[in-house]
Image: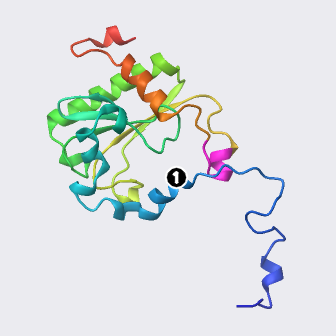
Amino acid sequence: MGEQPDDAAVTDTFELAGVPDSFQRLWTPHRLAYIKGGQKQVSSKETCPFCAAPERSDEESLIVHRGKHAFVILNLFPYNAGHLLVCPYRHVPDYTDIDPEETAEIAALTQTAMRVLRKVSSPTGFNLGMNQGETGGAGIAAHLHQHIVPRWGGDGNFLPIIAQTKAITQTLGEVRQQVAEAWPEEGSGPDSED
């Protein structure tokens, strides 16, 4: 293509990626499949990871609890260690698509998940939310899921902000085991979970 007359005015002197410089880089090639596929990866119930997860073992799917209408699973691409998702079993995209029983169970599982995470990892705060639709930021817009992200003071350091990289301190398997073991038995009241 060749140089354009105004290239020098808009181009810095930074070297190409891979050339040694003063920065250390954390490479995350495993995310490429997720990033490249985007919303097109989930085109139906048959290609939905949230529909496939309950058909496999808890350890393989990273499920920490199975309820009647919804289940709790670790996020495969967590923002923080312990990032959980509460998903209805039904393949529905929107919060208005779930029935009252599903709504109640998703709310109850969210509360229990917060209690369990407080017990196993002592977060000082949480981010809770549902990203609705592709333009609303949903990574998988075809299947509703509630995010539960534990937060600690200082966990939002420069890496995610500047480098778009997050350092996670535990493996997903370790977190799944801790949360699953701390999950209260069926019929236990909220007071027994603290």
Give above or below for 124 relative to 145.
above
Give the percent coordinates (x, y) of residue 123: 53, 24
Q: Give the residue at x 44% y 43%.
A: 76
What residue does disc 1 label? 30
Looking at the picture, tell me which residue is in the foreground, 22 or 162. Answer: 22
Q: Which residues are magenta?
A: 159-166
Q: What residue is rendered at 35% in x and 54% in y? A: 140
Which quadrant of the figure contains the N terminus? Answer: bottom right
Q: Residue at x 26, y 46 (%)?
A: 52
Residue 24 is left or right of residue 46, and the answer is right
| Type of amino acid at the residue the image marks with label 1 | His
Quarter location, residue 75: top left
Quarter in which the C terminus is drawn: top left
Residue 139 spot, x, y in % from top left: 40, 54
Residue 124 placement: quadrant: top right
Tell whether position 162 is magenta.
Answer: yes
